[in-house]
Image (cartoon, grey):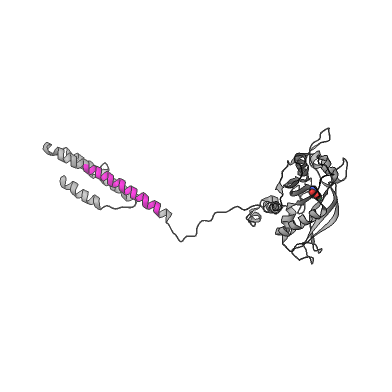
């Protein structure tokens, strides 16, 4: 019996196995019901009494060694397995993960905010669900004035006091909110979503984005307006960009103008994008009508100011040559993936 144990211990020492099936076979060989150990324990009964103590110790020691060896083989095998997964093939191309990118409207909005922040403008916000006063009355739209029809308003609630709840049709409403709570000097840009009841097409949508600008202080003149907008146009579209102001009408500004920038694509010669004119219309602007200042408690004899408003979709269309407004809202990844920017 002693011989068998010594022989088997030597064999056990040599075993070096890496797969679990072989380890199981070893376990059965030594520890199984008909295995070497149960055989030895059976023979143990016949060991003469005076040898029992020595043999018992030997046998138990052998059993412990077998168990330890099997545990060690299993542990080695697990290490080998996990290594083979980690370092499978180092030359394999890595799995790429997809990075998101900003929406083109966010990129353009942030760029406009950044440009105006350099000349002292901060960002103001107002609610999308507004009332008649902030969208129309305080901006000098008289009741029943046809200019209200220019903006197909979504009405939410008809109130008896005529101050209906509406979805704002323009971000000019934020002008009023700021004038009500802030004393001049005021220098803000107000980006946000606006809503108009329009049929959806390549050129019109019922939701779009505007950015409004407002500057009020003592002695603000039309020359300040023109110079600020020229600065913006050059920053946005390039140093060579020129602007022109055409007379227009808005109830809240007097005089009012529409601003065009020289077409970047054809350098002003005329192309498809500018429809042969060399100019692209990008915003409305003007000197704030004294009635608007007074309606929000600002003394129009002391203060003057200018305002401007532009569509973010339109600027992004010009910047990225996007021909269909609906693309902005469909969230098609093939479209969205094309835009990346530090903004
Ligand atoms: N609110 C006008 C619109 O939605 C845009 C606009 C025009 C804003 C002239 C202004 C402005 O601040 O002075 O069509």
Question: Range of the magenta residues?
Answer: 61-83
Residue at 18%, 42% (x, y): give it.
58
Whether residue 313 appears in this view of the structure is yes
Image coords of residue 127 (percent x, y): 73, 41
Image coords of residue 297 (percent x, y): 81, 39
Residue at 73%, 42% (x, y): give it.
128
Q: Is residue 41 left or right of residue 231?
A: left
Q: Is residue 84 left or right of residue 17?
A: right
The quarter of the picture where residue 314 lies is bottom right
Query: In front here: 285 or 340?
Result: 285
Image height of 36 relative to 90, above or below: above
The quarter of the picture where residue 35 lies is top left
Check the image and name the residue furthest to the bottom: 269
Magenta highlight on residue 70: yes
Q: Magenta stretch mostly in which secondary structure?
A: helix
Query: In front here: 247 or 341?
Result: 247
Image height of 151 relative to 243, above or below: above
Residue at 83%, 53% (x, y): give it.
257
Whether residue 46 appears in this view of the structure is no
Magenta highlight on residue 75: yes
Query: In front here: 85 or 167?
Result: 167
The quarter of the picture where residue 49 lies is top left
Image coords of residue 282 (percent x, y): 78, 55
Tag count in the figure? 0
Q: Quadrant of the N terminus?
A: top left
Image coords of residue 104 (percent x, y): 68, 54
């Amino acid at each position: 019996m002693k011989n068998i144990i010594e022989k088997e211990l030597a064999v056990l020492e040599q075993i070096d196995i890496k797969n679990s099936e072989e380890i199981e076979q070893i376990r059965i060989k030594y520890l199984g019901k008909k295995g070497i150990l149960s055989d030895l324990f059976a023979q143990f009964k016949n060991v003469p009494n005076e040898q029992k103590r020595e043999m018992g110790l030997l046998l138990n020691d052998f059993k412990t060694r077998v168990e330890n060896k099997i545990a060690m083989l299993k542990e080695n095998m697990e290490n080998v397995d996990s290594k083979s997964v980690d370092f499978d093939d180092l030359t394999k191309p890595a799995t790429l993960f997809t990075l998101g990118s900003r929406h083109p409207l966010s990129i353009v909005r942030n760029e406009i905010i950044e440009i105006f922040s350099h000349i002292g403008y901060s960002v103001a916000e107002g609610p999308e669900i507004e009332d008649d006063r902030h969208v129309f009355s305080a901006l000098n739209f008289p009741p029943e004035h046809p200019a209200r029809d220019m903006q197909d308003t979504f009405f939410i609630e008809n109130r008896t006091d005529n101050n209906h709840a509406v979805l704002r049709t323009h971000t000019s409403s934020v002008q009023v909110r700021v004038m009500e709570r802030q004393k001049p000097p005021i220098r803000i840009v107000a980006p946000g979503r606006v809503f108009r009841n329009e049929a959806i097409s390549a050129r019109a949508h019922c939701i779009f984005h505007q950015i409004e600008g407002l500057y009020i202080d003592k002695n603000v003149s039309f020359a300040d307006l023109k110079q600020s907008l020229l600065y913006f146009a050059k920053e946005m579209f390039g140093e060579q960009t020129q602007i022109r102001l055409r007379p227009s009408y808005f109830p809240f500004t007097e005089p009012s103008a529409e601003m065009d920038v020289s077409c970047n694509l054809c350098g002003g010669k005329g192309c498809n994008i500018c429809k042969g004119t060399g100019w692209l219309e990008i915003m409305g602007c003007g000197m704030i009508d004294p009635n608007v200042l007074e309606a929000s408690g600002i003394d129009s004899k002391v203060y003057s100011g200018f305002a401007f408003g532009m569509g973010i979709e339109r600027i992004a269309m010009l910047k990225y040559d996007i021909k269909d407004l609906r693309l902005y809202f469909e969230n098609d990844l093939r479209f969205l993936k094309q835009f990346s920017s530090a903004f």
